Image (cartoon, helix red, strand yellow):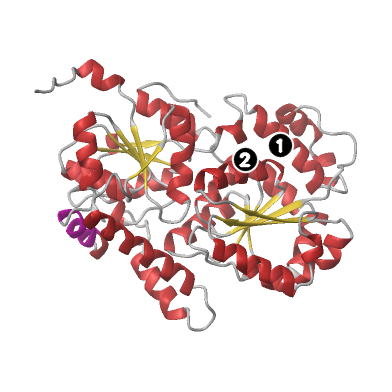
C-alpha cells in the first residue's frame, strides 16, 4: 500500500524532533527543557534504535574519545600534553580583527568524512519518514540533515563561542537556523560564513521549573532566599534596598534557618572529580559547626560516586553524609536532571567547570569556575567573569578560607545579583517562539 504525502499545513503542525547526543551532559541539559515544553522526549540520535550497528560504533568511538581526553587532561603533569591536544582540537581563533573565518578546519573536514560514512543517517531517515522539524543541541545531526537537503533544521548552540565545526562545509548555502545563547556566538557564525538571516539570538534554554515563566516567579523566590544566606551580615542588602525590593519584593526579614549550600558538580565525563579530595578536608570544621553545607554531584556515573565517597572517607567526613554533606547520584539522566534542578533551587554557590552550566548564572547562582576543559570553556568562563557572575577558582585546598572571605565581603551575593540582572533568562521561550514562528520576549 502506498503512503500519502502530508500537506504543507500538516507538516508545519507536526511535533518537532528534539535531538541530542550524549557527549557529557551539556547537549542533553539544553535539550531537556525544550522537549518538556514541546510535550515530547529527547531523541538520542547516537544510540539504537535510531541508529544501526555501524553508525552506533561511529558515535561510540567519538564519545569514548571525548571522555578519555577530558579525564586525562586533568591529571597533573602527565595531563599537560593531553590538554594541549584538547585545546588544539577545540581551538577557536580570536574574533578580532573581524575577518573571513569560513575556511574549513581539520575538524570540519573530519566531520564531513564521518557523515559520508554514515554518521547521522539514522536521524535523517527518521526525519524523512516523519516530515517533522529537527531541533538539535549538537551540531552533527544538524549538519547531516542539512547535507541531506532537509529543511526546518534548528541548531541550539550550547557555548558562548563556537568552533568552526558548528558550521557546515559550505556555510553560505546552509538551511540550518542557528539559535545562539550569546551575541558573540552569532558574530562567530557570521565570521564562519553563515548568513545573518540564519542566526537568531535566544539565550540558553534554562529549566522552566527554575525560572517560573515570564514573571520569573520561581527564580525571584529562590534568589531572595539565596541572598539572605549569602549576605549573613546584611551589608549587601543594606546598600541597595530599593533595587532589591523592586525586583524581588520583600526579602526574608528573619535570619536564614540554614547556612549557605555549596554545590560542586562535575561534568558528564567525570573530569575534575579529584578537586573534592583537595577541598573537603578544609571544610571539616565549618561543616561540623553548621556554617556551611556541601552537595557533591556525581551525576549518572557510579565511578564518580565511588571517587567522591573515597574523598569523603579520606577527609573523615563519612558521619556527615546525609546531613550537612550530601551526595547526588542517579541511574539515568532523566532522574539526575530532575534531582539536580531541585538541588539548584536551594543551592547558594555553584562550583563547576565552565561548561553549559555557566549559563545558569542567569538564575542568580554565583559561580565558582574550575579550570576550563577545552578552549570553548575558556570563552564561557570569560563571559561569566565579564558579567560579574563568575569567580575564578582559587587553590582548592584553601577553598574554605577564600569562600569564607567571599561570603563575609558580599562578593558572592554581588555575583548572584549580577548574574540575575545582566544575563539572559528567556532562552527557552525564545527558542520555542523561533521553532513555532512566534515573537520573543524583549528582555
Residue occupied by mark 2: 363
Q: Which residues are magenta?
A: 108-116
From the top left corner, tell me how far across and down residue 222 is, in percent. Answer: 71, 36
Q: Is residue 102 visible?
A: no
- Residue at 65%, 66% in the rendered image: 308
Query: Dot 1, crowdedness within 10 Å: few (<14), some or many (≥20)?
Result: many
Of residues 138 and 433, which is closer to you in this image? 138
Residue 372 located left or right of residue 310? left
CA distance separating discs 2 and 1: 9 Å
Question: What is the total number of numbered labels drawn onto the structure image?
Answer: 2
From the top left corner, tell me how far across and down residue 184 is, in percent. Answer: 42, 47
**Split into 4 quadrants, where in the image is the N terminus?**
top left
- Residue at 78%, 30% in the rendered image: 242
Q: Residue furthest bottom?
A: 77
Residue 149 located left or right of residue 30? left
| Cβ atoms at labels 2 and 1 below 8 Å apart | yes
Of residues 258 and 255, which is closer to you in this image? 258
Query: Dot 2, crowdedness within 10 Å: few (<14), some or many (≥20)?
Result: many
From the top left corner, tell me how far across and down residue 438 is, in percent. Answer: 39, 21
In magenta segment, residue 256: no
In magenta segment, residue 111: yes
Of residues 341 and 377, which is closer to you in this image? 341
Of residues 419 and 143, which is closer to you in this image? 143
Dividing the picture into quadrants, the one containing residue 353 is bottom right
Residue occupied by mark 1: 222
> Helix, strand or loop at disc 1?
helix
From the top left corner, tell me how far across and down residue 313 is, in percent. Answer: 73, 71
Q: Residue furthest front?
A: 1
Q: Earlier in the sequence, mark 2 or mark 1?
A: 1
> Magenta part mainly helix, strand or loop?
helix
Q: Is residue 306 visible?
A: yes
> Helix, strand or loop at disc 2?
helix
Amino acid at each position: 500500500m502506498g503512503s500519502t504525502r502530508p500537506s504543507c499545513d500538516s507538516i508545519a503542525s507536526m511535533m518537532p524532533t528534539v535531538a541530542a547526543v550524549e557527549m557529557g551532559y551539556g547537549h542533553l541539559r539544553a535539550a531537556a527543557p525544550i522537549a518538556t515544553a514541546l510535550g515530547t522526549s529527547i531523541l538520542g540520535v547516537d544510540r539504537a534504535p535510531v541508529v544501526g550497528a555501524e553508525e552506533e560504533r561511529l558515535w561510540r568511538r567519538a564519545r569514548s574519545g571525548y571522555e578519555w581526553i577530558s579525564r586525562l587532561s586533568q591529571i597533573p603533569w602527565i595531563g599537560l600534553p593531553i590538554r594541549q591536544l584538547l585545546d588544539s582540537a577545540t581551538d577557536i581563533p580570536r574574533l578580532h580583527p573581524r575577518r573571513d573565518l569560513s575556511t574549513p578546519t581539520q575538524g570540519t573536514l573530519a566531520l564531513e568524512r564521518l557523515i559520508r560514512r554514515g554518521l547521522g543517517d539514522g536521524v535523517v531517515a527518521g526525519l524523512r519518514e516523519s516530515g517533522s522539524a529537527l531541533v538539535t543541541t549538537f551540531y552533527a545531526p544538524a549538519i547531516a540533515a542539512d547535507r541531506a537537503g532537509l529543511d526546518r533544521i534548528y541548531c541550539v548552540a550550547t557555548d558562548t563561542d563556537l568552533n568552526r565545526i558548528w558550521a557546515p562545509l559550505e556555510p553560505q548555502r546552509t538551511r540550518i537556523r542557528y539559535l545562539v545563547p550569546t551575541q558573540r556566538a552569532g558574530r562567530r557564525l557570521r565570521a564562519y560564513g553563515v548568513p545573518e538571516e540564519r542566526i537568531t539570538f535566544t539565550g540558553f534554554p534554562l529549566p522552566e521549573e527554575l525560572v517560573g515563566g515570564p514573571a520569573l516567579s520561581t527564580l525571584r523566590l529562590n534568589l531572595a532566599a539565596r541572598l539572605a544566606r549569602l549576605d549573613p551580615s546584611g551589608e549587601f542588602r543594606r546598600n541597595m534596598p530599593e533595587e532589591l525590593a523592586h525586583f524581588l519584593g520583600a526579602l526574608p526579614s528573619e535570619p536564614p534557618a540554614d547556612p549557605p549550600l555549596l554545590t560542586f558538580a562535575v561534568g558528564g565525563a567525570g573530569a575534575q572529580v579529584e578537586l573534592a579530595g583537595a577541598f573537603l578536608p578544609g571544610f571539616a570544621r565549618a561543616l561540623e559547626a553548621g556554617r556551611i553545607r556541601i552537595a557533591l554531584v556525581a551525576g549518572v556515573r557510579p565511578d564518580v560516586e565511588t571517587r567522591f565517597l573515597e574523598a569523603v572517607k579520606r577527609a573523615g567526613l563519612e558521619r556527615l553524609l546525609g546531613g550537612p554533606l550530601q551526595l547526588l547520584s542517579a541511574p539515568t539522566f532523566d532522574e539526575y536532571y530532575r534531582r539536580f534542578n531541585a538541588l539548584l533551587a536551594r543551592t547558594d554557590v555553584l562550583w563547576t567547570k565552565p561548561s553549559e552550566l555557566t549559563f545558569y548564572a542567569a538564575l542568580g547562582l554565583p559561580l565558582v569556575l574550575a579550570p576550563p576543559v577545552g578552549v570553548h570553556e575558556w570563552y564561557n568562563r570569560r563571559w561569566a567573569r565579564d558579567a560579574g557572575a563568575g569567580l575564578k577558582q582559587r587553590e582548592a585546598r584553601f577553598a574554605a578560607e577564600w569562600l569564607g572571605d567571599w561570603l563575609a565581603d558580599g562578593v558572592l551575593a554581588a555575583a548572584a545579583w549580577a548574574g540575575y540582572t545582566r544575563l539572559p533568562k528567556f532562552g527557552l521561550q525564545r527558542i520555542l517562539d523561533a521553532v513555532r514562528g512566534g515573537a520573543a520576549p524583549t528582555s
